[in-house]
Image: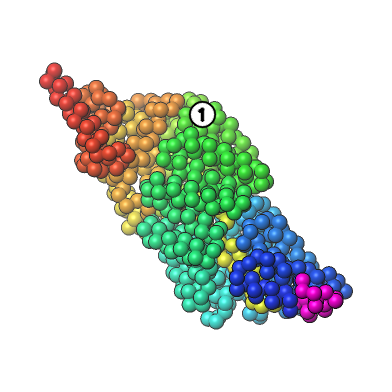
Amino acid sequence: MNSHHDSDPSIEDLLRLSEESRARFEDNQDLGNLDQAMEYLEQACARSSDDPALLGRLRADLAALLWVRFTFTNYPGDLDRATRELQAAAETSPQDDPIRGTTLVNLANALRARFARSGALADLDAAINVGRQAVTATAGDPTRAAALASLADALRARFARSGALADLDAAINVGRQAVAAATDDDPNRAIALSNLGSVLREAGQLQDAISYHQRALELFTATGDRHGEARALSNLGSVLREAGQLQDAISYHQQALELFTATGDRHGEARALSNLGSVLREAGQLQDAISYHQRALELFTATGDPHDQARALSNLGSVLREAGQLQDAISYHQRALELFTMTGDRHGEARALSNLGSVLREAGQLQDAISYHQRALELFTMIGDRHSEGAVLNDLGTTYRGLGRMQDAVSYHERALQLFTMIGDRHSEGVVLNDLGNTYRILGRHDEALRAFEQAGAQFESAGAFHAADVARKASRTDAPATGQRGDRAKINKPTSRPPDITSLSDARGSLAASSTERHDEFSQFYRDSVPALVTFLVWQGAGFADAADIVQETMIDALRSWPNITDPRTWVRRVASRKYARRITTSEPPAREVSNSPLVPTDVDVAEWEQRQDVLRLLAELPTRQRQVMAWTLDGYTTAEIAQELKLSPEAVRASLAKARSTLVRLLDRE
């Protein structure tokens, strides 16, 4: 502190000095200036103990500076202290204090941010309660739009956790009120538009969500708010991803990455890298996805935040699992588990356990998979995440089926079905019914299997087929969201300047997009046209008919979930089915029992005759696995270049395998 201020400066002098230091920080982003501004405010607070109203305002201002430092350092102690200062300010400020509403909005935002870090539902519930107080306190006040937008975002977040439709309905209603309350010159109008866009995205109303995010982007750009502009670009990228417009999503995320980098927001930069990784993963560009997720992990590690680092590890583990690099995936998920456990993030810990269970199942380590899934189930049950609880119950059923413990499999599937029925998640009911039908079919309980498949179809139809599991319940995917479940931070501003910047969380979840009747008809036609050929394709590779039918059923359910994002469905289902078959023959999952009744082919088809009609099968069976695989793709009409791309081989290697296969087949034909 300068020497001429050492002689006991007044509160007014301290506030002026704090403002000057803050202004210097805003000019040069030097945290030393921000620390100096906080020191002056702390001294002013110490001298205001006999004036509760003034002290409340000063503590709220101090909280705003702590928040700013938190956004730069990501140090959780700053967030916790900001929350405490705001709680104290709210308790001491008079009911008629004109800045009380802003203080309450800031407190709600701080609690909301703390929930995003820890997953503690108590913080989110508190954010909603405080948010409702803020709405009441701002009646007739310019900050009312900010209060409504903040409450809408918190309600959306609680819906995303619990699946309570009442919260989603309330979020939509409150979000629309926020937009209506924000005048054209209200600095919070862009934020209200953005938050409503995120709520509508959660509800599966993707075109409306895109429209609101675009309007928010225009406002942020017009006002020169580059951070807001970057967040809006990121939000647009995420909702376009869900709408299946992957190239547009990549473009917006790349623009967001450039802006976050230009503004020095390293966390925003890392989240943009993670978002790009997730979109590229959905586009099937797995190596590029891995590269972006690795860059995100490096940045999150450099910033020193174990929460973000854990989520980045989890994301990387998930894409490595999809790329078939199972041991690496296990390693990354284990590291994520250690960090989630260390930081006390019980929800993150549960997701990591569930992810480990899933990848261990794919690696054939079924007993270990069951152990991890059981631990995940206990945690999800304890913290009240019913959708994830149901998903893990269903995963346990699938894993027990792999072990041949069919009655245990049926029991867990039925428990999952009861839970999803109770909470009204029709899409997840359909997923479980499909898995239950497969288990019944393996048991030879064909009538029950057929009923389960029919009920699954009815549930998908009832849920809208392409709707996001009754607005994206997230339960069928337990990998961490691409943005690390933080998304855009809410920003606490000085209560004495302008209302807080309340932004939406832009988690890049892999949920399904709502679709039109045209898309539904399109998928139904594709299903009818493609199933027999896809079964044949797998049989050419060596699968028995029942195994092929089982895999095709699973593949078509996956296609249904991802339909809006699939640009080449014929190739997509063959790629996915081939991977499922490869995993099945390299793990301990028992083959499906050979049965003559499959819901995938007409009932008048004799399975043995159907296979025997294809004389080529006898010859293909003589080929090595790689040659047989190449021949299957060739017989299905794919070119050498296309096969090379799908099998991750060079064109030369494909041509060599094809030449050897043809030579062998000619020799076998001559022998006959």
Indicate whether 77 appears above or below 526: below
Residue 399 in the figure: left or right of residue 88: left
Task: Please tell me whether residue 131 belongs to the stretch shown in magenta.
Answer: no
What's the residue at 72%, 74% (across, down)?
18
Any part of residue 182 in sight: yes
Relative to 69, say whether 17 is above or below: below
Picture coordinates of residue 574 (x, y %)? 31, 40
Q: Nearer the viewer, residue 36 or 140?
A: 36
Q: Residue at x 67, y 73 (%)?
A: 22
Quadrant holding the C terminus: top left
- 141 vs 271, nearest the viewer: 271
In the depicted structure, whether residue 590 falls above or below residue 241: above
Q: Which residue is mark 1?
A: 366
Q: How many marks?
A: 1
Residue 3 in magenta?
yes
Identity, as a three-letter code, of the amino acid under mark 1:
Leu
Tag 1's secondary structure? helix
Q: Is residue 49 left or right of residue 647?
A: right
Residue shown at 13% from the left, 17% from the top? 671
- What residue is rendered at 18% in x and 24% in y? 664
Side of 428 relative to 61 (left or right) = left
Residue bounds of the magenta highlight: 1-15
**In the image, is 630 to the left or to the right of 435?**
left
